[in-house]
Amino acid sequence: MSKGPGLFSDIGKKAKDLLTKDYSSDQKVSISTYSSAGVALTSTAVKKGVVSTGDVAAQYKHKNAVIDVKVDAESNISTTLTFTDIIQSTKTIASFKLLDYNSGKLEVQYFHDHATLTTAFGLKQSPVIDVSANIGTPSFAIGAEAGYDTANGSFPKYTAGISVTRPDSCASIILGDKGDSIKASYLHYLDQPKKSAAVTEITRKFSTNENTFTVGGSFAIDHLTQVKARLNNHGRLGALLQHEIVPKSVMTLSGEVDTKALDRNPRFGLAIALKP
């Protein structure tokens, strides 16, 4: 694949991941193993409040193809097939649930040194067709996405964005919700390995005149331990501690509290991922 501007979904992704990734109020344990045939197996158990769920996922890679199969506690079977370079500089992703023929989806991504194009649609009658495009370079990109509902001839969504990426920082602006919201974010790395960073995000929704301002950051205590925190103007304070127990096996302890309603119980989450 080319090292071009990336997908439209990459705009603002680094800042979003720092503010949201790994924050959870659930209890989750996942264990991964590898078979002699090269199949990666992952068993996951999740407890959300008083509800417990689980699933088993398998992944097999062969040349330019990746096959993912997941079976959950309700016996739903989800399958994703990913093919790289069937046509040069493309990635094709097909996903579906067995016995649910309306769940099928096909996505094709095309990568060029100065542009990327993605088309996705459901494998059913009168599907919604999503199209996105990005033009630029790895350091500067501008793009847009839109969804077209073939059933009624309407556009349920359209979004535009711009991003600027430098070796030590990245910034983005996204106009979303069919022009009803705008989000601006800025992330700055504090060290060369890019394990410590600070981020700011501002979102405004025009229809309600509501503004949300969020600041956050991550800090590497050592090569095995990292802490993250975030706070918005509505008083939601979140923090997490992530520690690599053994190589590739990580424990994450997270929590969130409403500083404007301290009488409410804070939320805590624990996630353990064990890998060989």
Image: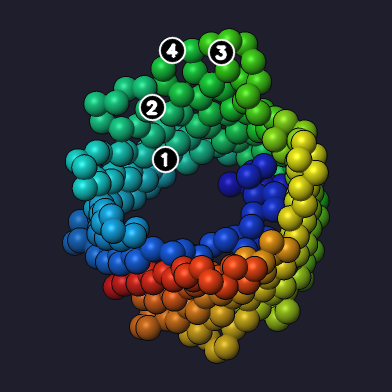
Near mark 1 (Cα within 10 A), the count class, few <14, some 14-19 or many ≥20, is some
As drawn, the label of residue 236 is none
Q: Mark 1 points at which residue?
A: 82
- Assign a secondary structure to mark 2: strand
* CA separation in Å, label 1 and label 3: 26 Å
Q: Mark 2 points at which residue?
A: 104
Instruction: Give the total of numbered labels.
Output: 4
* CA separation in Å, label 4 and label 1: 23 Å
* CA separation in Å, label 3 and label 2: 16 Å
Place of residue 44 in the rendered image (x, y in percent of width and height, measured from the top left): 28, 59
* CA separation in Å, label 2 and label 4: 11 Å
- Assign a secondary structure to mark 1: strand
CB under 8 Å between callouts 3 and 2?
no
Q: Mark 3 points at which residue?
A: 150
Sequence-wise, the earlier of marks 1 and 2 is 1
Instruction: Using the image as rendered, state which of residue 34 and residue 13 is in the foreground.
Output: 13
Sequence-wise, the earlier of marks 3 and 4 is 4
Place of residue 207 in the rendered image (x, y in percent of width and height, measured from the top left): 77, 36
CB under 8 Å between callouts 1 and 2?
no
**Which amino acid, mark 1?**
Thr
- Assign a secondary structure to mark 4: loop
Task: Determine whether, in the image, residue 125 is placed left or right of residue 272.
Answer: right
Near mark 3 (Cα within 10 A), the count class, few <14, some 14-19 or many ≥20, is few
**Which amino acid, mark 2?**
Gly
Residue plotted at (59% across, 68% down): 261
- The reply to whether residue 51 is visible in this rendering is yes
